[in-house]
Image: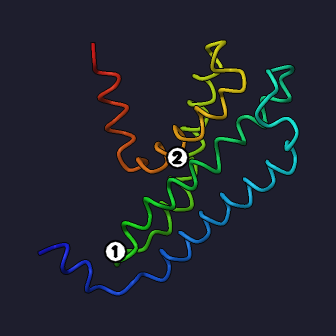
Amino acid sequence: MNAVNNQLRPINKERLCYIIGYFGISLILLMMIFSILKTYIFYFDVKHENWNFYRFLWCIPFAFLGFSFLALIYIRSPDSPFPKYLIYYPILLFFMCSIVFGVLHLFKSSSSFLYYYLSAPICFTLGYLADDFRSLAKSALNKK
Protein backbone atom coordinates (compact mmCIF):
# COMPACT_ATOMS: atom_id res chain seq x y z
CA MET A 1 0.00 0.00 0.00
CA ASN A 2 2.87 2.39 0.80
CA ALA A 3 4.47 1.84 -2.61
CA VAL A 4 1.17 2.67 -4.32
CA ASN A 5 0.81 5.88 -2.29
CA ASN A 6 4.41 6.79 -3.08
CA GLN A 7 3.77 6.44 -6.83
CA LEU A 8 0.72 8.70 -6.60
CA ARG A 9 2.65 11.54 -4.94
CA PRO A 10 4.02 14.27 -7.17
CA ILE A 11 7.76 14.59 -7.71
CA ASN A 12 9.39 16.84 -5.15
CA LYS A 13 10.98 19.59 -7.26
CA GLU A 14 13.51 20.52 -4.56
CA ARG A 15 14.76 16.93 -4.39
CA LEU A 16 14.93 16.81 -8.18
CA CYS A 17 17.15 19.90 -8.21
CA TYR A 18 19.52 18.32 -5.68
CA ILE A 19 19.64 15.07 -7.68
CA ILE A 20 20.49 16.94 -10.87
CA GLY A 21 23.07 18.96 -8.93
CA TYR A 22 24.84 15.89 -7.54
CA PHE A 23 24.73 14.17 -10.92
CA GLY A 24 26.07 17.30 -12.64
CA ILE A 25 28.86 17.74 -10.09
CA SER A 26 29.96 14.15 -10.60
CA LEU A 27 30.04 14.50 -14.39
CA ILE A 28 31.90 17.83 -14.27
CA LEU A 29 34.48 16.41 -11.86
CA LEU A 30 34.98 13.34 -14.04
CA MET A 31 35.52 15.49 -17.13
CA MET A 32 37.99 17.71 -15.25
CA ILE A 33 39.96 14.74 -13.94
CA PHE A 34 40.09 13.10 -17.36
CA SER A 35 41.25 16.32 -19.00
CA ILE A 36 43.95 16.92 -16.39
CA LEU A 37 45.28 13.38 -16.23
CA LYS A 38 44.34 11.95 -19.61
CA THR A 39 47.85 10.63 -20.31
CA TYR A 40 48.57 9.42 -16.79
CA ILE A 41 45.23 8.33 -15.44
CA PHE A 42 45.52 4.56 -15.54
CA TYR A 43 49.19 3.72 -15.92
CA PHE A 44 51.31 5.68 -13.48
CA ASP A 45 52.53 4.47 -10.11
CA VAL A 46 52.50 6.62 -7.00
CA LYS A 47 55.45 9.00 -7.37
CA HIS A 48 54.96 11.90 -4.98
CA GLU A 49 52.38 13.06 -2.51
CA ASN A 50 50.97 15.64 -4.92
CA TRP A 51 49.80 12.89 -7.30
CA ASN A 52 47.79 11.33 -4.50
CA PHE A 53 45.49 14.35 -4.45
CA TYR A 54 44.26 13.45 -7.94
CA ARG A 55 43.66 9.90 -6.82
CA PHE A 56 41.49 11.19 -3.98
CA LEU A 57 39.63 13.41 -6.46
CA TRP A 58 39.04 10.31 -8.59
CA CYS A 59 36.85 8.84 -5.82
CA ILE A 60 34.58 11.84 -5.28
CA PRO A 61 32.59 11.84 -8.55
CA PHE A 62 31.78 8.14 -8.23
CA ALA A 63 30.50 8.60 -4.68
CA PHE A 64 28.37 11.56 -5.81
CA LEU A 65 27.08 9.54 -8.75
CA GLY A 66 26.10 6.66 -6.47
CA PHE A 67 24.40 9.08 -4.11
CA SER A 68 22.42 10.66 -6.95
CA PHE A 69 21.02 7.21 -7.79
CA LEU A 70 20.14 6.72 -4.12
CA ALA A 71 18.38 10.10 -4.05
CA LEU A 72 16.21 9.03 -7.00
CA ILE A 73 14.53 6.51 -4.72
CA TYR A 74 13.28 9.31 -2.45
CA ILE A 75 12.28 11.75 -5.21
CA ARG A 76 8.60 11.58 -4.25
CA SER A 77 9.15 12.14 -0.54
CA PRO A 78 7.32 15.30 0.54
CA ASP A 79 9.77 16.43 3.22
CA SER A 80 12.51 18.92 2.44
CA PRO A 81 16.02 17.53 1.82
CA PHE A 82 17.71 20.85 2.57
CA PRO A 83 19.91 20.34 5.62
CA LYS A 84 20.85 16.73 4.92
CA TYR A 85 21.62 17.04 1.20
CA LEU A 86 23.86 20.09 1.65
CA ILE A 87 25.59 19.36 4.94
CA TYR A 88 25.35 15.75 6.11
CA TYR A 89 25.69 13.80 2.88
CA PRO A 90 28.60 15.73 1.31
CA ILE A 91 30.60 15.33 4.52
CA LEU A 92 29.72 11.65 4.64
CA LEU A 93 30.66 11.15 0.98
CA PHE A 94 34.04 12.84 1.46
CA PHE A 95 34.62 10.70 4.55
CA MET A 96 33.81 7.52 2.63
CA CYS A 97 36.12 8.57 -0.21
CA SER A 98 38.94 9.18 2.23
CA ILE A 99 38.43 5.71 3.73
CA VAL A 100 38.58 4.09 0.28
CA PHE A 101 41.60 6.19 -0.64
CA GLY A 102 43.43 5.28 2.56
CA VAL A 103 42.63 1.58 2.53
CA LEU A 104 43.60 1.09 -1.11
CA HIS A 105 46.91 2.88 -0.56
CA LEU A 106 47.79 0.60 2.35
CA PHE A 107 48.49 -2.29 0.01
CA LYS A 108 51.19 -2.08 -2.63
CA SER A 109 49.24 -4.08 -5.22
CA SER A 110 46.19 -1.79 -5.08
CA SER A 111 48.15 1.47 -4.99
CA SER A 112 49.29 1.09 -8.61
CA PHE A 113 47.02 1.51 -11.64
CA LEU A 114 44.60 -1.02 -10.10
CA TYR A 115 43.60 1.76 -7.72
CA TYR A 116 41.35 3.28 -10.39
CA TYR A 117 39.60 0.03 -11.20
CA LEU A 118 39.00 -0.78 -7.55
CA SER A 119 38.12 2.63 -6.14
CA ALA A 120 35.48 3.64 -8.69
CA PRO A 121 32.99 0.80 -8.06
CA ILE A 122 33.65 0.83 -4.31
CA CYS A 123 32.96 4.57 -4.06
CA PHE A 124 29.88 4.26 -6.28
CA THR A 125 28.52 1.47 -4.06
CA LEU A 126 29.27 3.36 -0.86
CA GLY A 127 27.59 6.47 -2.29
CA TYR A 128 24.53 4.40 -3.12
CA LEU A 129 24.54 2.92 0.39
CA ALA A 130 25.05 6.27 2.13
CA ASP A 131 21.82 5.92 4.12
CA ASP A 132 22.96 2.56 5.50
CA PHE A 133 26.58 3.58 6.11
CA ARG A 134 26.19 3.99 9.87
CA SER A 135 24.62 0.55 10.33
CA LEU A 136 27.12 -1.05 7.94
CA ALA A 137 30.05 0.47 9.85
CA LYS A 138 28.64 -0.68 13.19
CA SER A 139 28.12 -4.23 11.93
CA ALA A 140 31.63 -4.34 10.44
CA LEU A 141 33.22 -3.10 13.66
CA ASN A 142 31.21 -5.46 15.89
CA LYS A 143 32.28 -8.62 14.05
CA LYS A 144 34.90 -10.62 15.87
Q: Which residue is mark 1?
A: 77
Q: Amino acid at mark 1?
A: Ser
SS type, badge 1: loop
Q: Is residue 18 above or below residue 104?
A: below
Quarter of the rendering containing residue 51: top right
Q: Which residue is mark 2?
A: 124
Q: Nearer the viewer, mark 2 or mark 1?
A: 2
Specify whether 131 is left or right of 16: left
Q: Amino acid at mark 2?
A: Phe
Q: Residue at x 51, y 37 (%)?
A: 122
SS type, badge 2: helix
Specify whether 92 is left or right of 26: left
- What percent of the width, then of the height, locates residue 30? 72, 53
- Badge 1: residue crowd in 10 Å (few <14, some 14–19, many ≥20): some
Q: Which mark is residue 86?
A: none
Whichever of callouts 2 and 1 sits on the residue coming sooner in the sequence is 1
Q: Is residue 96 above or below residue 86?
A: above
